[in-house]
Image: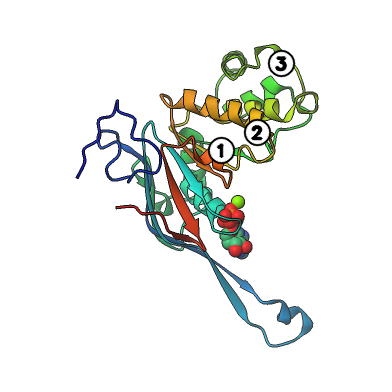
Amino acid sequence: MRIANSTTSTGPQTSENADNQQTAPVVQCQNVTRSYTGRGSGSLLGRKEHTQTVTAVSDVSVTVRERELVGIAGPSGSGKSTLLHLLAALDVPTSGVVTVNGTDTSSLSERALARMRLNNIGIVFQHFYLLPALSARANVALPLVELGLSRKERRSRASTLLEKVGLGDRESHKPSELSGGEQQRVAIARALSTKPKLLIADEPTGELDTETGASILDLFDDLRDECALVVASHDQQTLDRMDRVVRLQDGERIDDHA
Ligand code: ADP
Ligand code: MG
């Protein structure tokens, strides 16, 4: 087995067990399955009731370590978002174990899960989800209310982050006054505001043109020293920038991993 040196670039799509031997796991899925069970439509029409089970993620194992940039690839419906929700502790698996920063997510109450997300995880979505009535700075500062930071600290941290994502001169702009790429930068700054160990992004370049998308990927590269990143995408340009890519098809992991 090859022992990788942490300073050596291993290139894309290498085996995760050979990579980053020296760095600690930030999040780990072991044989994780997530099924959704719902009632079939027939019951509404008075027909015989039946249940339907959709297995969105099936027996997937993934480990993401510090300083890694990991892609999740697969066609629409292959389970990427479901897997990200499990890694982000927004959801718990039907079977298998998800461990975030050493803690099994299924062992926590809803309240404890929310606290663990606040302390460990930042999330970025394709559609940004900024609050339209708030300025860029107020959007970035919002998660810090829950962390109990003073107004002065919140403002200062939000300003520093907007500067970092290249929007120091847009602090007071509302989302509607910003381009798509700028809104995504605000969303990334907001996700970073709580100093997460793990940044999770679901199709973060899906709404952006190629050039703007590339600038968001440059930003992710710059964040490596601060947090691990997991990015779901079906865009090859995005996947090419990852250290390695986990490939899903019909909920199963199909890439060659040890
Ligand atoms: P992707 O992000 O790769 O497009 P998803 O994780 O969103 O895939 O979905 C994977 C599969 O799980 C799809 O077949 C989808 O319809 C199903 N699914 C996702 N969320 C739910 C849900 N809340 N209830 C029922 N089925 C779901
Ligand atoms: Mg999705």
Q: Earlier in the sequence, mark 2 or mark 3?
A: 3
| Residue at 74%, 16% in the rendered image | 172
Check disc 3 and report the residue beneath it. Answer: 170
Q: Is residue 129 above or below residue 163?
A: below
Count of numbered circles on the image: 3
- Mark 3 or 1: in front is 1
Check disc 1 and report the residue beneath it. Answer: 237
x, y percentage for residue 162? Answer: 62, 18
Residue 129 in sight from this viewpoint: yes
Q: Is residue 77 above or below residue 54?
A: above
Q: CA distance from mark 1 to mark 2?
A: 8 Å
Check disc 2 and report the residue beneath it. Answer: 210
Q: Is residue 186 above or below residue 82?
A: above
x, y percentage for residue 211? Answer: 65, 28
Q: Residues within 10 Å of mark 3 (few under 14, many from 20)?
A: some
| Residue at 25%, 35% in the rendered image | 4
Residue type at the position of mark 2: Thr
- Mark 2 or 3: in front is 2
Q: Quadrant of residue 67?
A: top left
Q: Are marks 1 and 2 in contact (CB under 8 Å)?
A: yes
